[in-house]
Amino acid sequence: MAGRRDVKPSPTAALAAPAPPYYIATRPLHIGGQFGRAHNVGDRVPAEHVELYGWHDGVRLPDGYEAPASAPTIAPETGSGQATSKEGEA
């Protein structure tokens, strides 16, 4: 049986910031221990490898790439940070 083709993407997927195509290593990155070096300082590291191996603390964004601003909120903001309703509304 074929899958549905009328599935719409999630509205929150459109708000997600695009990841850069690569990162820059800020320290030697290893796979499988001390001697399994994968990248040296200054190497381009594919974004999917950063996610896969958890190297977030050993990489930086490439020069000229600006991190996108925080995602816009869907709910209206109030003074306390919570949406409120009027008295008597459910």
Image (cartoon, helix red, strand yellow):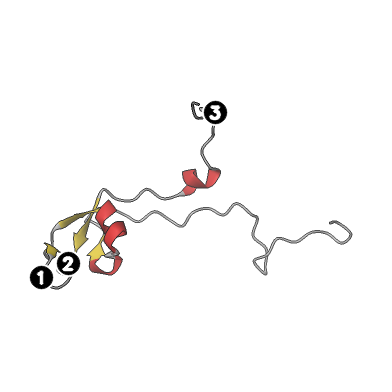
At label 3, counting other C-alpha atoms closer than 10 Å, the crowd grade (few under 14, some 14-19, many 20 or more) is few
Mark 1 is surrounded, within 10 Å at the Cα level, by few (under 14), some (14 to 19) or many (20 or more) other residues, namely few
Rounded to the nearest angstrom, the CA distance separating label 3 from label 1 is: 49 Å
CB contact under 8 Å: marks 2 and 1: yes
State which tag comes first along the sequence, 2 or 1. Answer: 2
Q: Amino acid at mark 3?
A: Asp
Residue 30 placement, left or right of 16 = left
Question: Which residue lies under the disc numbered 3?
Answer: 6
Residue 11 seen in this snapshot:
yes
Instruction: Using the image, tell me which numbered label, if any, was put on residue 86.
Output: none
- Mark 1 — residue? 35
Q: Secondary structure at mark 3?
A: loop
Task: Tell me the residue at 50%/30% (across/down).
Answer: 3
Q: Which residue corresponds to the image point at 67% horizontal and 63% vertical from the top-left?
A: 78
Question: Pointer 2: what residue?
Answer: 30
> At which x and y percent is residue 13?
48, 45
In the image, residue 11 above or below residue 4: below
Query: Of callouts 3 and 1, which one flags the residue occurring earlier in the amino acid sequence?
Result: 3
Residue kind at label 1, given as amino acid type: Phe
- Give how far across and how far down residue 68 sits, in percent: 39, 53
Looking at the image, tell me whether mark 3 or mark 2 is earlier in sequence order.
3
Look at discs 3 and 1 and give the one toward the viewer: 1
Q: Judge from the rendering whether residue 43 lies leftward or rightward of residue 12; answer left or right.
A: left
| Amino acid bearing label 2 | His
Left or right: 27 in relation to 4 = left
Front residue of this view, candidates 73 and 79: 73
How far is mark 3 from mark 2, CA to CA?
43 Å
Is residue 57 placed above or below 90 in the rendered structure? below
Mark 2 and mark 1: span between their CA atoms?
A: 7 Å
Q: Quadrant of residue 81?
A: bottom right
